[in-house]
Image (cartoon, rainbow, N blue to C red):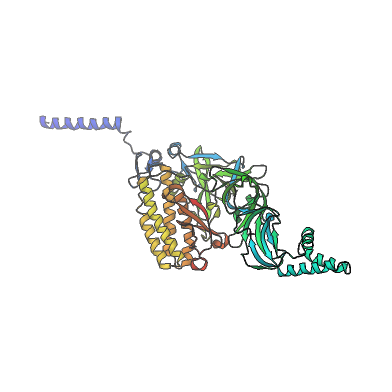
Amino acid sequence: MNTKNKNTLKMVGILFAGVLLGWIFFGGDNAPKSDHEQSTSESKETIWTCSMHPQIRMNEPGLCPICGMDLIPLESNGSSIDPDAIQMTDDAMKLANIQTMIVGGGDNASKKLALNGKVQIDERKLYTQSTHIPGRIERLMINFTGEKVSRGQTLAMVYSPELVTAQEELLQAYRMKDAQPDLFSAAKQKLSNLKIGEGTINKIISTNKPIHQFPITADVSGIITAKKVDLGHYVGQGMPIYEIADLSSLWVLFDVYESDMPWVKVGNKIRYTVQSLPGESFEGVITFIDPLINPQTRVASARVEVKNFENKLKPEMFVSGVISNMVSKSTSKDIVIPKTAVMWTGERSVVYMKSLVSNKVNFKLREVTLGASLGDAYIIKEGLSEGDEIVVKGTFTVDAASQLAGKPSMMNISEGKNDHINLSEFNNDNELQRIKVSSIFQEQLKTVFKDYLNLKDALVKDDFKGTKQFSKDLVKNLNKVDMELISDEHTHSQWMTLEKKIKSAANNILKAETIEKQRISFKQLSLYFTNAIQIFGVNQTVYKQFCPMVNDNQGAYWLSLTKEIYNPYFGEAMLTCGSTKEVLE
């Protein structure tokens, strides 16, 4: 074997030995992983996504490239036992600032009910002054309403031909009283029947001539509230000439809507203020509740009797009052939870339940039945039990995560009929907390609100085509609202949720085949816009107005910039049906 072949064999041997040694020392690390090991490794990788834009997937935290919202971690939920539950890590919960509470009874919960009303005259102290003498008004001592009179004060002078004749008969009978005493007694009785006193009769006899003008005097003291005669009028016996009211005590009549009646009882204390007396507050007790409901306004009156010291109160003054009712376990077994825990989907109201499965936190949607609104809380009639743990802060974030995972959420819960609206969402006390946002965002929202108002006006005019056009404009301008102007995550979630609902309701109006169906969706649109304005504001005064006849006599609301009532639910058929329920500043 020559030298060249020897060197070739030597090099091949060295190469083979190197490969063998490499496989021995490093081959095990490069072996393919088992399916279990590969699955375990992948399960530990955290994917970051946007709660409002689930198509975004990032390998590290940051901001959403679409809306600028903080990304949240999304992990595999394959270990969750309940397929309808969403599982979140402790890090994800901390990042989303999710807080929970264990629910119990209604300890220390209170229902604050706001009522509006007017000061009115006490009907028991309203007196009609009539004349007991038929004749012509020769003089009026009281010439205008509002004048104060005292009992016995002369109000007017009357010339009565009938009374003059009766006096002449008296004088003739007096001359023959010895011969015909019964005739004299009858003549005196005739004058007495006309309320001519004994002293006046003796004066007529002593002067031997009739009196031509007789005074009409006040039977009670008070204020003249109505003047029913003028100089020269002829009045018959018993005809009313003035109305006199004693204003030393008055009634304050509060309007109580049908839905609020369970919270108003005789004996309730109410604190109230008078619009024309700023800085002063009053307190009274409800002494009477009207047993009849006004069929037009759907309200009954609750009466408070007040002493009018210093005559500060005047009839027809506007008043605003608040009744507080405590709800405790001794009187109610209902569950009370914060309003922040509840999400509404038109007819349905839902909360998120927290549970531990295999030492991991699970959240699952549960439908609840709302009772009365208690200021910043709700009574839960059905759906929860004492000891249940629910999400009270960060509810929208949990719901967004549930949507991303394809779990049941408020956006994909099975829909039922939407012809009715849960009126508890419009209770006087259901005032959402105002959140400070940029003025640019408010102006953009205000532009969308103008489209809402145009849409409302089209319904008032029964304009089907106009309603469709303004719905289209609303959706167009809603898409122009810059969501990046809201940096706070919770606020951002609130706006995104409301935006979807507003857009959905507007699109339903756009697709509606009749104006009746447009009005059904308009109820939903008004509900969502009310919440949007309460949360974000539009830098102008908005009136929340109520029609009691719509929605199968449950009533429905709409928003307006004017106090005048123009009903969008009935249009020309019942144009002025309704009233202003609340002012959103």
Image-quadrant location for residue 163 = bottom right
Residue 196 versus residue 267 in the image, above or below: below
Q: Is residue 444 visible?
A: yes
Image-quadrant location for residue 235 = bottom right
The front one of 393 and 17 is 393
Residue 64 versus residue 194 in the image, above or below: above
Residue 510's spot in the image, x, y percent? 41, 63
Residue 478's spot in the image, x, y percent? 38, 54
Residue 233's spot in the image, x, y percent? 63, 67
Residue at 73% from the left image edge and 68% from the top image edge? 164
Image-quadrant location for residue 28 = top left
Residue 428 versus residue 552 in the image, above or below: above
Residue 232's spot in the image, x, y percent? 62, 67
The front one of 126 and 102 is 126
Q: Is residue 56 visible?
A: no
For the N terminus, the quadrant is top left
The front one of 244 and 7 is 244
Left or right of residue 158: residue 15 = left
